[in-house]
Image (tube, rainbow, N blue to C red):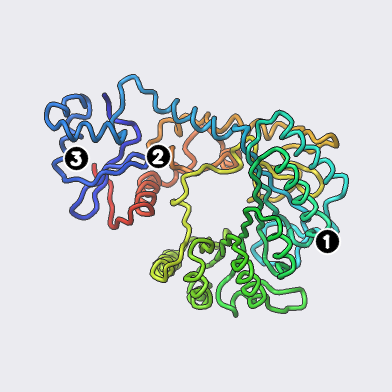
Amino acid sequence: MKLSKYTLFFNDEDRFIVYNSLYDSIMICTSQVVALIRDNEESVDSIENIHPSLFNYLAQKKFIVADDSDEVQEFISSLEQEFDDEREYSITINPTMNCNLKCWYCYEEHLAHSMMSSETMDSICKLLQSIFAEHKAKSLHLSFFGGEPLLGFNKCVNPLIQYTNELCKRHDADFSFSFTTNAVLLARDLCDILYGYGRNVSFQIPFDGSRKVHDSIKHTYNREGTYDTILANLKYALSKNFHVTARCNYTRDSAESFSDFINDIAPLLKQYPETLKIAFQQVWQDAENGKASEIIEKLEARINNIGGRYYTPTMDSSRCYADKKNSFVINYNGDIYQCTAREFTEINKEGILQSDGTILHNDRYRLRMESRFSNPECLECKVFPICNLCTQKRIERGNDKCLCSNYPNYKDDLAISRINSLYKFTRMNKSE
């Protein structure tokens, strides 16, 4: 047996923690146990003679593995199976790149007369038909993005949902759909239509702080605030048993104001603990600020005390959707992309949807797929299994070294954050 390459050691006040990043395994122990493991790191089998029950536990939790175990290849194989799984498809559709609001931090250009044509919709339907032609697909998820996708609800969104719903029924496949929307147009009649499909429906709805702060950012072109409208629409969506993530876009200046937002949404956190989730996200143009992070941590603790749920990236060990072969974005004009976090421009395009429903990919797409497992430093990294740095960042920054080499504590901080999010430990430090 040998020590797993993904086993790390930390201390939490007077306790010691052994953690495996591949299996999220954890063991709380004394310094003597850690010393026993570290002293026998080169001859792990000797632990069996000294402490048989410890040895068996270490093997059971994969802190130690067989000598001939190739953990890197085993992990890559599992990722390849996930990334290229022909049973699951996730397609993001941009019905339009127009929007009824103009938030200062939005990175997308608003194209006033952009709306998906009937020809592009026909091509999408042919693509969907081809997905089920070989009877491999077992689940399909449509995600509507943009722009503001609800601007195209009647012309594009609802017809595509209706078509896909019937297609999935015929092929006995699971179907779900979601929206990233400012929710200004998420009126009751629209919610009732979606409820009629009887499918798994979810929404990501952004807020920018208290009513005053939010309305200064998310307002109509007539300068009318949207806070009350969005909150009312969110409430009705929850009443229909839809899943909602309230994405709180904060800056150094606005973080404090989310205390008022939590006041307003607290009754909903109590009433809908399984379907409402809060996710704090710092606006990407805003510089890091320790004070803002402290404020957000206190707000998350408050949400927890209320009985609600919140999301942080370290809770999620899944890999980026852009790394997956059968996850992609179809723009209103038929252009194909992988990532929704970048502008939908010609330089970022990775293919085009052709009239017969096939996708013609370009070199950028092929580069992305090749970069998934080709970084030598990643393959040797102890936190590779929980590192969510995606192919998008590899393409932009190069793929020949660790993308976080400028942050010397990144690996330890990532593991500590992961452990804290799972097990709620504090004051953790790496144990040398």
**What residue is at 77 percent from the left and 32 percent from the top?**
360
Left/right of residue 357 with respect to residue 13 in the rendered view: right
On the image, the x and y values in percent for residue 113 come to 86, 59
User: Which amino acid does the dot numbered 2 rest on?
Assistant: Val
Left/right of residue 192 with respect to residue 429 in the rendered view: right
**What residue is at 73 percent from the left and 48 percent from the top?**
165
User: Which amino acid does the dot numbered 1 rest on?
Assistant: Ala
Classify the position of the N terminus by image quarter.
Answer: top left
- Say which label, 3 or 2, has the lower sequence index: 3
> Mark number for residue 383?
2
Query: Vertically, is 375 above or below 403?
Result: above
User: Callout 2: helix, strand or loop?
Assistant: loop
**Location of residue 151 by image quarter:** bottom right
On the image, the x and y values in percent for residue 158 come to 77, 55
| Residue at the spot of label 3 | 34
Query: Vertically, is 426 above or below 340?
Result: below
Residue occupying the far left of the picture: 50
User: Which amino acid does the dot numbered 3 rest on?
Assistant: Val
How far is mark 3 from mark 2, CA to CA?
A: 20 Å
On the image, the x and y values in percent for residue 49 come to 13, 26
The reply to whether callout 3 and callout 1 are in contact (CB within 8 Å) is no
| Residue at the spot of label 1 | 112
How far is mark 1 from mark 2, CA to CA?
A: 44 Å
